[in-house]
Image (cartoon, rainbow, N blue to C red):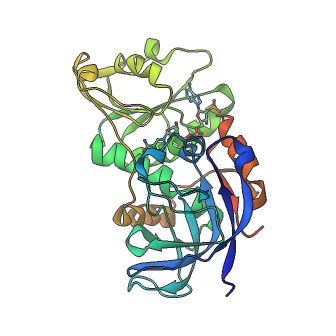
Amino acid sequence: MSETMKAAVIHQFGDTNQFTIEARPLPIPGVGEVLIEVYASGVNPIDLKTRIGQGVSHFWTATNFPIVLGWDISGVVVESKAPEFKVGDEVFGMPRFPELADAYAEFVSAPANELTRKPHNISHIEAAAIPLAALTAWQALFDTAKLLAHQTVLIHAGAGGVGHLAIQLAKWKGASVVSTTSNQNIAFVTNLGAEKVIDYTSTNYWEVLSNIDVVFHMISPDLREKSYQTMKSGGHLISITGPVSPEEPAAYNVNGQFISVRPNGKQIAQIAELLRSGDIKVEIDASYPLKDVAKAHKHVEGGHTKGKVVIDLKS
Ligand SMILES: NC(=O)c1ccc[n+]([C@@H]2O[C@H](COP(=O)([O-])OP(=O)(O)OC[C@H]3O[C@@H](n4cnc5c(N)ncnc54)[C@H](OP(=O)(O)O)[C@@H]3O)[C@@H](O)[C@H]2O)c1
């Protein structure tokens, strides 16, 4: 194996022109970690926010540029210092978040307990699209809101990366789903299982919805007040796009909080089971070779991704 690899690096925070493809030393896995040959790396809005110096950049005590962005990976173990995996195992996950994982690269070292085996029935491109979005949905709906089968959940942005997986997870749980999307994605979101789909370009959701038990708010924080108006007393709103003060939901007699996703090996293994069984599927909007990482970021920056955008390290 070569001592170096290709990675998409940035030398300072900024726009997509910051990306350059450079040779970097191969990472060395620590105890409990594996070295993965990366086949695909998912792109998430948090990558874009962090690229401009926002997002999760405040979590790092010292930023030694150049840095490599990206967290979602799928690939093959080429060296193992962990009992969980052996060389040749296909794995996927979202290691180290919110610390840097250096995922836009040909090789990544990652803690084994933040990974799981890739289901054989999905490709590396599909697997790399899953972890951050699906873990966010899992932690919001199940850990935080404790969504139950008889409840109705409003999942905003149902065609997006988090939304399209959240709808399927809520349906698997047995809940009723209401969602928002633009006209062009109504059929897509309906086919995911949403009973009611509201075209946000022509209808104000807060004027047509009421008695909602759980709201998964992943659109503009400015619209959060409108989401509270749709809720049942005692309901639960989870925001992933802005902080929520204790007073804010209390004014509507509901619970509300902001969450930030974290790696979780047990949960990603449960998500892998649902992928194996076909209970959930991921939609790939586009994939780009590593050299076109800037195009991948611009695609997501457009704000209308249908499902997920992925970097294909093998194209
Ligand atoms: N706190 C956390 O841990 C965490 C974790 C993951 C994501 N997030 C954040 O959550 C947000 C969503 O993430 P994502 O990965 O799902 O993003 P995404 O895939 O880029 O979302 C794109 C989708 O948003 C839809 N959309 C845009 N404006 C909308 C509106 N007003 N109403 C309904 N749908 C709308 C678009 O639908 P149309 O094309 O039909 O317009 C598109 O399908 C991002 O801000 C992200 O940073 C936070």
- The quarter of the picture where residue 302 lies is top right
- Tell me what residue is drawn at x 48 percent, y 87 percent: 86
Q: Report the front residue among 1 and 94.
A: 1
Q: How many marks?
A: 0
Q: Quadrant of ligand 1?
A: top right
- The quarter of the picture where residue 257 lies is top left
**Image quarter (top left, top right, bottom left or bottom right) of the C terminus:** bottom right
Q: Report the front residue among 196 and 212.
A: 212
Q: Residue 201's spot in the image, x, y percent?
A: 62, 19
Q: Residue 131's spot in the image, x, y percent?
A: 49, 57
Can residue 56 be spotted in the picture?
no
Can residue 25 be spotted in the picture?
yes
Q: Residue 39's spot in the image, x, y percent?
A: 65, 70
Decide: is 181 above or below 74.
above
Decide: is 156 above or below 249.
below
Q: Is residue 71 left or right of 152 when viewed as pictured?
A: right
Q: Is residue 126 left or right of 174 when viewed as pictured?
A: right
**Image quarter (top left, top right, bottom left or bottom right) of the N terminus:** bottom right
- Tell me what residue is drawn at x 56 percent, y 15 percent: 203
- Direction top: furthest residue: 207
Q: Is residue 139 left or right of 62 when viewed as pictured?
A: left
Q: Residue 269's spot in the image, x, y percent?
A: 40, 67
Q: Report the front residue among 256 and 188.
A: 256
- Tell me what residue is drawn at x 29 percent, y 40 percent: 145
